[in-house]
Protein backbone atom coordinates (compact mmCIF):
# COMPACT_ATOMS: atom_id res chain seq x y z
CA UNK A 1 0.00 0.00 0.00
CA UNK A 2 1.30 3.43 -0.92
CA UNK A 3 2.08 5.47 2.19
CA UNK A 4 1.21 9.17 2.11
CA UNK A 5 2.21 11.55 4.91
CA UNK A 6 -0.98 13.09 6.24
CA UNK A 7 -1.72 16.24 8.23
CA UNK A 8 -5.16 15.98 9.93
CA UNK A 9 -5.17 19.43 11.59
CA UNK A 10 -7.06 20.53 14.70
CA UNK A 11 -10.64 20.17 13.53
CA UNK A 12 -10.35 16.71 11.98
CA UNK A 13 -9.03 15.50 15.33
CA UNK A 14 -11.98 16.95 17.24
CA UNK A 15 -15.18 18.33 15.76
CA UNK A 16 -14.86 16.74 12.30
CA UNK A 17 -13.69 13.25 13.26
CA UNK A 18 -16.06 11.75 10.73
CA UNK A 19 -14.19 13.48 7.90
CA UNK A 20 -10.90 12.07 9.20
CA UNK A 21 -12.36 8.60 9.68
CA UNK A 22 -14.03 8.38 6.27
CA UNK A 23 -10.99 9.98 4.59
CA UNK A 24 -8.56 7.43 5.99
CA UNK A 25 -10.97 4.58 5.21
CA UNK A 26 -11.58 5.49 1.57
CA UNK A 27 -7.89 6.19 0.96
CA UNK A 28 -7.05 2.74 2.40
CA UNK A 29 -9.73 1.09 0.25
CA UNK A 30 -7.99 2.64 -2.77
CA UNK A 31 -4.53 1.49 -1.77
CA UNK A 32 -3.30 4.70 -0.12
CA UNK A 33 -2.43 4.69 3.55
CA UNK A 34 -2.68 8.17 5.08
CA UNK A 35 0.13 8.15 7.65
CA UNK A 36 -0.35 10.87 10.24
CA UNK A 37 2.73 13.06 10.77
CA UNK A 38 4.42 11.87 13.97
CA UNK A 39 4.47 15.32 15.55
CA UNK A 40 2.27 18.16 14.40
CA UNK A 41 0.59 21.29 15.60
CA UNK A 42 -2.21 23.57 14.41
CA UNK A 43 -1.44 25.44 11.16
CA UNK A 44 -3.05 28.63 12.50
CA UNK A 45 -6.23 28.25 10.46
CA UNK A 46 -5.67 31.53 8.59
CA UNK A 47 -3.08 32.46 6.01
CA UNK A 48 -1.65 35.83 7.10
CA UNK A 49 -2.47 38.54 4.56
CA UNK A 50 -0.33 41.24 6.20
CA UNK A 51 3.10 41.28 4.61
CA UNK A 52 5.05 43.18 7.26
CA UNK A 53 4.97 40.45 9.88
CA UNK A 54 6.01 36.84 9.33
CA UNK A 55 5.00 35.55 12.79
CA UNK A 56 1.88 33.83 11.53
CA UNK A 57 3.92 31.84 9.01
CA UNK A 58 5.84 30.09 11.78
CA UNK A 59 3.16 27.53 12.70
CA UNK A 60 2.51 26.31 9.14
CA UNK A 61 6.27 26.27 8.44
CA UNK A 62 6.74 23.95 11.42
CA UNK A 63 4.14 21.61 9.91
CA UNK A 64 5.96 21.68 6.57
CA UNK A 65 9.24 20.97 8.36
CA UNK A 66 7.68 17.94 10.08
CA UNK A 67 6.43 16.74 6.71
CA UNK A 68 9.84 17.21 5.13
CA UNK A 69 11.32 14.82 7.70
CA UNK A 70 8.88 12.17 6.48
CA UNK A 71 8.85 12.58 2.73
CA UNK A 72 8.33 14.79 -0.27
CA UNK A 73 4.66 15.53 0.10
CA UNK A 74 1.98 16.03 2.69
CA UNK A 75 -1.71 15.42 2.13
CA UNK A 76 -4.53 17.31 3.83
CA UNK A 77 -8.28 16.81 3.88
CA UNK A 78 -9.29 20.05 5.59
CA UNK A 79 -9.60 22.70 2.86
CA UNK A 80 -8.34 25.39 5.23
CA UNK A 81 -5.24 23.44 6.33
CA UNK A 82 -4.60 22.74 2.65
CA UNK A 83 -4.97 26.43 1.80
CA UNK A 84 -2.72 27.63 4.64
CA UNK A 85 0.01 25.02 4.05
CA UNK A 86 0.02 25.44 0.29
CA UNK A 87 0.16 29.25 0.40
CA UNK A 88 2.88 29.11 3.04
CA UNK A 89 4.87 26.71 0.90
CA UNK A 90 4.43 29.03 -2.12
CA UNK A 91 5.39 32.11 -0.08
CA UNK A 92 8.57 30.46 1.22
CA UNK A 93 9.46 29.23 -2.25
CA UNK A 94 9.13 32.72 -3.72
CA UNK A 95 10.91 34.44 -0.85
CA UNK A 96 14.02 32.53 0.29
CA UNK A 97 14.98 35.38 2.64
CA UNK A 98 11.69 34.91 4.48
CA UNK A 99 12.33 31.16 4.74
CA UNK A 100 15.78 31.85 6.15
CA UNK A 101 14.36 34.27 8.71
CA UNK A 102 11.73 31.76 9.87
CA UNK A 103 14.27 28.93 9.97
CA UNK A 104 16.48 31.13 12.12
CA UNK A 105 13.62 31.72 14.51
CA UNK A 106 12.34 28.14 14.73
CA UNK A 107 15.87 26.65 14.73
CA UNK A 108 14.59 24.09 12.24
CA UNK A 109 16.07 23.93 8.77
CA UNK A 110 13.04 23.74 6.50
CA UNK A 111 14.41 23.12 3.01
CA UNK A 112 11.28 24.30 1.21
CA UNK A 113 10.70 21.18 -0.82
CA UNK A 114 7.43 19.71 0.43
CA UNK A 115 4.56 19.38 -2.04
CA UNK A 116 1.22 20.10 -0.39
CA UNK A 117 -1.61 18.04 -1.87
CA UNK A 118 -5.30 17.58 -1.23
CA UNK A 119 -6.78 14.08 -1.27
CA UNK A 120 -9.00 15.24 -4.17
CA UNK A 121 -5.83 15.98 -6.14
CA UNK A 122 -4.46 12.49 -5.47
CA UNK A 123 -7.75 10.93 -6.58
CA UNK A 124 -7.80 12.94 -9.81
CA UNK A 125 -4.12 12.90 -10.72
CA UNK A 126 -2.73 9.68 -9.22
CA UNK A 127 -5.73 7.35 -9.28
CA UNK A 128 -7.91 8.91 -11.98
CA UNK A 129 -11.71 9.14 -12.20
CA UNK A 130 -12.05 6.10 -14.45
CA UNK A 131 -10.15 3.92 -12.03
CA UNK A 132 -12.20 5.30 -9.12
CA UNK A 133 -15.39 4.46 -11.04
CA UNK A 134 -14.13 0.90 -11.48
CA UNK A 135 -13.63 0.54 -7.72
CA UNK A 136 -17.21 1.56 -6.96
CA UNK A 137 -19.23 -1.40 -5.70
CA UNK A 138 -22.37 0.51 -4.72
CA UNK A 139 -23.03 2.99 -7.52
CA UNK A 140 -24.99 5.93 -6.08
CA UNK A 141 -27.41 5.81 -9.00
CA UNK A 142 -30.10 8.46 -8.88
CA UNK A 143 -28.58 10.42 -6.00
CA UNK A 144 -28.56 14.13 -6.83
CA UNK A 145 -25.50 15.59 -5.11
CA UNK A 146 -24.55 19.27 -5.34
CA UNK A 147 -20.80 19.91 -5.24
CA UNK A 148 -20.06 22.90 -3.03
CA UNK A 149 -16.51 24.20 -3.36
CA UNK A 150 -16.51 27.28 -1.14
CA UNK A 151 -13.54 29.63 -1.17
CA UNK A 152 -10.25 28.45 0.20
CA UNK A 153 -10.00 25.16 -1.70
CA UNK A 154 -9.80 27.11 -4.97
CA UNK A 155 -8.61 30.66 -4.33
CA UNK A 156 -6.26 32.33 -5.01
CA UNK A 157 -5.70 30.34 -8.19
CA UNK A 158 -2.12 31.59 -8.69
CA UNK A 159 -1.08 30.00 -5.40
CA UNK A 160 -3.49 27.06 -4.98
CA UNK A 161 -4.02 26.04 -8.62
CA UNK A 162 -6.20 23.02 -7.79
CA UNK A 163 -8.98 23.80 -10.26
CA UNK A 164 -10.66 26.61 -12.17
CA UNK A 165 -11.64 29.11 -9.46
CA UNK A 166 -14.81 30.27 -11.24
CA UNK A 167 -16.02 27.04 -12.86
CA UNK A 168 -14.46 24.13 -10.95
CA UNK A 169 -15.19 20.52 -11.86
CA UNK A 170 -13.14 18.34 -9.50
CA UNK A 171 -16.05 17.55 -7.12
CA UNK A 172 -18.45 17.22 -10.07
CA UNK A 173 -16.13 14.60 -11.59
CA UNK A 174 -15.80 12.75 -8.30
CA UNK A 175 -19.59 12.63 -7.81
CA UNK A 176 -20.04 11.35 -11.37
CA UNK A 177 -17.38 8.66 -10.82
CA UNK A 178 -19.36 7.44 -7.80
CA UNK A 179 -22.42 6.95 -9.99
CA UNK A 180 -24.37 9.90 -8.59
CA UNK A 181 -25.61 12.92 -10.50
CA UNK A 182 -23.73 16.19 -9.88
CA UNK A 183 -26.19 19.06 -9.49
CA UNK A 184 -25.00 22.45 -10.70
CA UNK A 185 -26.19 25.45 -8.75
CA UNK A 186 -25.18 29.11 -8.95
CA UNK A 187 -23.81 29.38 -5.40
CA UNK A 188 -21.29 26.55 -5.64
CA UNK A 189 -18.24 28.79 -5.14
CA UNK A 190 -19.97 31.39 -2.97
CA UNK A 191 -18.62 32.07 0.54
CA UNK A 192 -20.39 30.51 3.57
CA UNK A 193 -19.15 33.33 5.82
CA UNK A 194 -16.08 31.52 7.10
CA UNK A 195 -14.78 32.95 10.42
CA UNK A 196 -17.64 35.45 10.57
CA UNK A 197 -19.45 32.75 12.45
CA UNK A 198 -17.47 33.72 15.59
CA UNK A 199 -18.11 37.43 15.12
CA UNK A 200 -21.38 37.97 13.30
CA UNK A 201 -23.13 34.58 13.22
CA UNK A 202 -26.26 36.08 11.70
CA UNK A 203 -24.27 37.14 8.62
CA UNK A 204 -22.78 33.69 8.06
CA UNK A 205 -26.17 32.05 8.71
CA UNK A 206 -27.78 34.21 6.04
CA UNK A 207 -25.07 33.35 3.50
CA UNK A 208 -25.28 29.66 4.37
CA UNK A 209 -29.07 29.51 4.14
CA UNK A 210 -28.89 31.09 0.68
CA UNK A 211 -26.36 28.50 -0.47
CA UNK A 212 -28.42 25.54 0.78
CA UNK A 213 -31.63 27.03 -0.64
CA UNK A 214 -29.96 27.50 -4.01
CA UNK A 215 -28.80 23.87 -4.07
CA UNK A 216 -32.27 22.67 -3.04
CA UNK A 217 -33.91 24.75 -5.74
CA UNK A 218 -31.63 23.06 -8.27
CA UNK A 219 -32.90 19.69 -7.08
CA UNK A 220 -30.04 18.57 -4.81
CA UNK A 221 -30.63 15.90 -2.15
CA UNK A 222 -27.23 16.46 -0.51
CA UNK A 223 -24.44 19.02 -0.59
CA UNK A 224 -20.88 17.80 -0.90
CA UNK A 225 -17.95 19.73 0.54
CA UNK A 226 -14.25 19.37 1.40
CA UNK A 227 -14.13 21.97 4.18
CA UNK A 228 -15.04 21.45 7.86
CA UNK A 229 -15.87 25.14 8.31
CA UNK A 230 -18.22 25.12 5.29
CA UNK A 231 -19.76 21.91 6.64
CA UNK A 232 -20.41 23.54 10.00
CA UNK A 233 -21.63 26.87 8.66
CA UNK A 234 -24.04 25.24 6.20
CA UNK A 235 -25.36 22.60 8.61
CA UNK A 236 -25.59 24.70 11.79
CA UNK A 237 -28.61 26.76 10.62
CA UNK A 238 -30.38 23.45 9.90
CA UNK A 239 -30.01 22.19 13.50
CA UNK A 240 -32.94 21.22 15.66
CA UNK A 241 -33.97 24.23 17.75
CA UNK A 242 -36.85 24.94 20.12
CA UNK A 243 -38.85 25.72 16.97
CA UNK A 244 -38.18 22.24 15.58
CA UNK A 245 -37.11 21.89 11.98
CA UNK A 246 -38.44 23.24 8.72
CA UNK A 247 -38.40 19.89 6.94
CA UNK A 248 -36.30 21.47 4.21
CA UNK A 249 -32.93 20.38 5.60
CA UNK A 250 -30.56 18.48 3.37
CA UNK A 251 -27.44 16.63 4.57
CA UNK A 252 -24.12 18.48 4.19
CA UNK A 253 -21.62 15.71 3.48
CA UNK A 254 -17.88 15.47 3.12
CA UNK A 255 -16.91 13.98 -0.23
CA UNK A 256 -15.16 11.16 1.64
CA UNK A 257 -18.45 10.12 3.28
CA UNK A 258 -20.12 9.73 -0.10
CA UNK A 259 -17.10 7.78 -1.31
CA UNK A 260 -17.24 5.45 1.71
CA UNK A 261 -20.80 4.46 0.78
CA UNK A 262 -19.96 3.96 -2.90
CA UNK A 263 -16.82 1.96 -2.17
CA UNK A 264 -18.90 -0.47 -0.13
CA UNK A 265 -17.33 0.29 3.24
CA UNK A 266 -19.21 -0.65 6.44
CA UNK A 267 -21.33 2.07 8.01
CA UNK A 268 -18.90 2.79 10.86
CA UNK A 269 -16.38 3.93 8.24
CA UNK A 270 -18.84 6.45 6.76
CA UNK A 271 -18.13 8.71 9.74
CA UNK A 272 -21.59 10.27 9.66
CA UNK A 273 -22.46 10.45 13.37
CA UNK A 274 -23.28 13.69 15.12
CA UNK A 275 -24.16 15.83 12.10
CA UNK A 276 -26.97 18.34 12.59
CA UNK A 277 -28.81 16.92 9.61
CA UNK A 278 -28.59 13.16 9.85
CA UNK A 279 -27.63 11.75 6.45
CA UNK A 280 -27.99 8.10 7.52
CA UNK A 281 -31.58 7.46 6.42
CA UNK A 282 -30.82 8.72 2.91
CA UNK A 283 -27.42 7.02 2.63
CA UNK A 284 -28.81 3.70 3.90
CA UNK A 285 -31.52 3.86 1.25
CA UNK A 286 -28.98 4.62 -1.45
CA UNK A 287 -26.72 1.80 -0.26
CA UNK A 288 -29.64 -0.62 -0.11
CA UNK A 289 -30.88 0.33 -3.56
CA UNK A 290 -27.39 -0.37 -4.92
CA UNK A 291 -27.68 -3.84 -3.40
CA UNK A 292 -25.50 -5.50 -0.81
CA UNK A 293 -22.79 -6.14 -3.34
CA UNK A 294 -19.92 -8.00 -1.70
CA UNK A 295 -16.67 -6.11 -1.92
CA UNK A 296 -14.36 -7.95 -4.35
CA UNK A 297 -11.34 -7.46 -2.08
CA UNK A 298 -12.61 -6.57 1.39
CA UNK A 299 -10.49 -3.85 3.02
CA UNK A 300 -8.74 -4.98 6.23
CA UNK A 301 -11.00 -2.86 8.43
CA UNK A 302 -14.09 -4.68 7.14
CA UNK A 303 -12.63 -8.16 7.57
CA UNK A 304 -14.21 -10.31 10.24
CA UNK A 305 -17.18 -8.05 10.81
CA UNK A 306 -19.40 -10.45 8.88
CA UNK B 1 -20.14 65.43 5.14
CA UNK B 2 -17.48 67.74 3.74
CA UNK B 3 -14.22 66.08 2.79
CA UNK B 4 -11.13 67.95 1.82
CA UNK B 5 -8.95 66.12 -0.64
CA UNK B 6 -5.40 67.35 -0.41
CA UNK B 7 -1.99 66.16 -1.51
CA UNK B 8 -1.06 66.03 2.14
CA UNK B 9 -3.63 63.27 2.76
CA UNK B 10 -2.82 61.44 -0.46
CA UNK B 11 0.72 60.94 0.80
CA UNK B 12 -0.07 60.58 4.46
CA UNK B 13 1.44 58.12 6.91
CA UNK B 14 -1.89 56.28 6.86
CA UNK B 15 -1.63 55.63 3.12
CA UNK B 16 1.96 54.50 3.50
CA UNK B 17 0.98 52.15 6.36
CA UNK B 18 -1.84 50.58 4.34
CA UNK B 19 0.48 50.03 1.38
CA UNK B 20 3.30 48.66 3.49
CA UNK B 21 1.18 46.21 5.49
CA UNK B 22 -0.78 45.01 2.45
CA UNK B 23 2.09 45.07 -0.02
CA UNK B 24 -0.41 46.52 -2.52
CA UNK B 25 -0.44 49.65 -4.67
CA UNK B 26 -3.62 51.55 -3.74
CA UNK B 27 -3.61 53.63 -6.92
CA UNK B 28 -3.69 50.51 -9.09
CA UNK B 29 -7.45 50.44 -8.44
CA UNK B 30 -9.40 52.36 -11.09
CA UNK B 31 -12.75 51.99 -9.33
CA UNK B 32 -14.44 49.70 -11.83
CA UNK B 33 -16.54 48.25 -9.01
CA UNK B 34 -16.24 44.60 -9.95
CA UNK B 35 -15.23 43.69 -6.38
CA UNK B 36 -18.40 45.26 -5.00
CA UNK B 37 -20.57 43.63 -7.66
CA UNK B 38 -19.41 40.14 -6.78
CA UNK B 39 -18.87 40.45 -3.04
CA UNK B 40 -21.01 37.80 -1.29
CA UNK B 41 -21.15 39.78 1.97
CA UNK B 42 -21.80 43.23 0.47
CA UNK B 43 -25.38 43.15 1.74
CA UNK B 44 -24.12 43.19 5.34
CA UNK B 45 -21.64 46.03 4.72
CA UNK B 46 -22.17 49.73 5.47
CA UNK B 47 -19.82 50.68 2.65
CA UNK B 48 -18.98 48.83 -0.56
CA UNK B 49 -15.53 47.26 -0.95
CA UNK B 50 -14.65 49.60 -3.83
CA UNK B 51 -15.62 52.58 -1.66
CA UNK B 52 -13.26 51.34 1.05
CA UNK B 53 -10.40 51.36 -1.45
CA UNK B 54 -11.41 54.84 -2.66
CA UNK B 55 -11.32 56.22 0.87
CA UNK B 56 -7.97 54.59 1.53
CA UNK B 57 -6.60 56.06 -1.72
CA UNK B 58 -7.66 59.50 -0.54
CA UNK B 59 -6.09 58.98 2.88
CA UNK B 60 -9.43 59.19 4.68
CA UNK B 61 -8.79 57.53 8.03
CA UNK B 62 -12.58 57.49 8.65
CA UNK B 63 -12.56 54.26 6.68
CA UNK B 64 -11.30 52.56 9.85
CA UNK B 65 -14.72 53.17 11.41
CA UNK B 66 -16.46 51.22 8.67
CA UNK B 67 -18.04 47.85 9.49
CA UNK B 68 -17.03 46.66 6.05
CA UNK B 69 -13.42 45.92 6.98
CA UNK B 70 -14.66 43.49 9.65
CA UNK B 71 -17.41 41.94 7.52
CA UNK B 72 -14.98 41.03 4.73
CA UNK B 73 -14.58 37.25 5.14
CA UNK B 74 -11.38 37.07 3.04
CA UNK B 75 -13.18 34.74 0.62
CA UNK B 76 -10.95 36.03 -2.21
CA UNK B 77 -13.75 36.31 -4.79
CA UNK B 78 -12.78 39.92 -5.57
CA UNK B 79 -9.09 39.22 -6.08
CA UNK B 80 -10.00 36.40 -8.46
CA UNK B 81 -11.97 38.87 -10.60
CA UNK B 82 -10.07 42.18 -10.28
CA UNK B 83 -8.94 43.29 -13.77
CA UNK B 84 -6.11 45.30 -12.22
CA UNK B 85 -4.83 42.49 -10.01
CA UNK B 86 -5.46 44.41 -6.80
CA UNK B 87 -5.46 42.11 -3.79
CA UNK B 88 -8.33 43.73 -1.93
CA UNK B 89 -8.38 41.12 0.90
CA UNK B 90 -4.81 42.20 1.70
CA UNK B 91 -5.93 45.85 1.82
CA UNK B 92 -8.83 44.89 4.11
CA UNK B 93 -6.38 42.99 6.31
CA UNK B 94 -4.11 46.05 6.45
CA UNK B 95 -7.02 48.21 7.62
CA UNK B 96 -7.95 45.60 10.24
CA UNK B 97 -4.32 45.35 11.34
CA UNK B 98 -4.04 49.12 11.76
CA UNK B 99 -7.12 49.02 14.02
CA UNK B 100 -6.02 45.92 15.93
CA UNK B 101 -2.51 47.25 16.48
CA UNK B 102 -4.10 50.38 17.95
CA UNK B 103 -5.96 48.18 20.44
CA UNK B 104 -9.26 47.31 18.74
CA UNK B 105 -10.91 43.97 19.52
CA UNK B 106 -13.79 42.71 17.43
CA UNK B 107 -14.90 39.51 19.12
CA UNK B 108 -16.92 39.28 22.25
CA UNK B 109 -17.47 35.64 23.07
CA UNK B 110 -19.81 36.63 25.92
CA UNK B 111 -22.22 38.01 23.35
CA UNK B 112 -22.28 34.91 21.17
CA UNK B 113 -25.09 32.40 21.74
CA UNK B 114 -23.74 29.80 24.24
CA UNK B 115 -25.03 26.87 22.16
CA UNK B 116 -23.00 28.17 19.21
CA UNK B 117 -19.82 28.63 21.27
CA UNK B 118 -20.11 25.02 22.51
CA UNK B 119 -20.42 23.69 18.99
CA UNK B 120 -17.99 25.86 17.00
CA UNK B 121 -15.33 23.89 15.15
CA UNK B 122 -11.82 24.49 16.46
CA UNK B 123 -10.55 26.13 13.30
CA UNK B 124 -13.30 28.77 13.47
CA UNK B 125 -12.15 29.74 16.96
CA UNK B 126 -8.44 29.70 16.12
CA UNK B 127 -8.96 31.54 12.83
CA UNK B 128 -11.50 33.99 14.20
CA UNK B 129 -9.25 34.96 17.09
CA UNK B 130 -6.38 35.59 14.69
CA UNK B 131 -8.59 37.71 12.46
CA UNK B 132 -10.41 39.81 15.03
CA UNK B 133 -8.22 40.13 18.15
CA UNK B 134 -4.54 40.92 18.68
Image (cartoon, coloured by chain):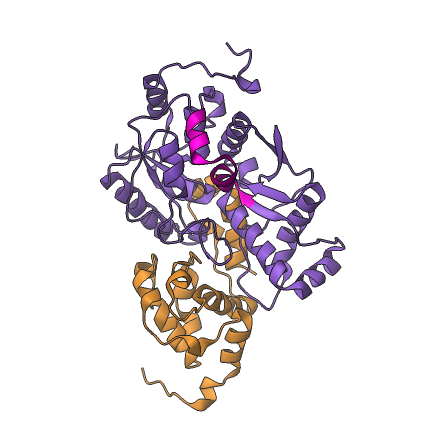
Q: Is residue A294 magenta?
A: no
| Residue B111 visible in the snapshot | no
Start-end of magenta stretch: A117-135
**Residue A228 position within the rendered picture, expressed as x and y whole percent measured from the top left:** 47, 41
In the displayed structure, B45 sits above or below A86; it is: below
Residue A263: give x, y in percent of width and height. 45, 24
| Residue at the image point whose x is 29% and y is 43% from the top | A184
Q: Residue furthest right?
A: A107
Magenta portion: prevailing SS class? helix
With A108 as the anchor, is A26 left or right in this view? left
Asked if B49 appears above or below A180 in the picture, the reply is: below
Label the orange chain with its letter: B
- The outermost residue toward the front is A130
Q: What residue sits 35% from the left and 70% below the top?
A: B50
Which picture quadrant has residue A87? bottom right
Question: Where does the image place residue A160, in percent across and percent down from the top left?
Answer: 50, 53
Residue for point 48% across, 16% down? A296
* Residue drawn at point x = 44 percent, y = 81 percent: B59
Percent x, y of residue A298 = 52, 17
Q: Left or right: where does residue B21 sit relative to residue A108?
A: left
Q: How many badges with numbers are in the image?
A: 0
Residue that lies at the very extreme toward the top in this rendered image: A306
The quadrant of the rendering that contains the N terminus of chain A is top right
- Chain A's shade in the image? purple
Residue A292 visible (yes or no): yes
In the shown orientation, is residue B55 left or right of residue A303? left
Residue A129 forms part of the magenta stretch: yes
Amino acid sequence: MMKIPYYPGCTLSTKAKGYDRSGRAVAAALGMELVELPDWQCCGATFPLATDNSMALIAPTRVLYQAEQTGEQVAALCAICYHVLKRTQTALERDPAMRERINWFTEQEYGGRVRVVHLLELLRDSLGWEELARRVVRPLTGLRAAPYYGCLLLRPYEEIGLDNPEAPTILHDLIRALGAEPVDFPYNTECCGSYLTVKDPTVSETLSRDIVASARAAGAQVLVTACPLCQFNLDWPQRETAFGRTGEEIPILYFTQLMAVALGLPEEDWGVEGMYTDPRPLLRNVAQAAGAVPHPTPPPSAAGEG
Amino acid sequence: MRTVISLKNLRSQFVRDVEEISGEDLLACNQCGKCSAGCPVAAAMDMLPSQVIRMAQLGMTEVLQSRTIWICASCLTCVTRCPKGVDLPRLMEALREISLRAGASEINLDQLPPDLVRELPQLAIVGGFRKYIK
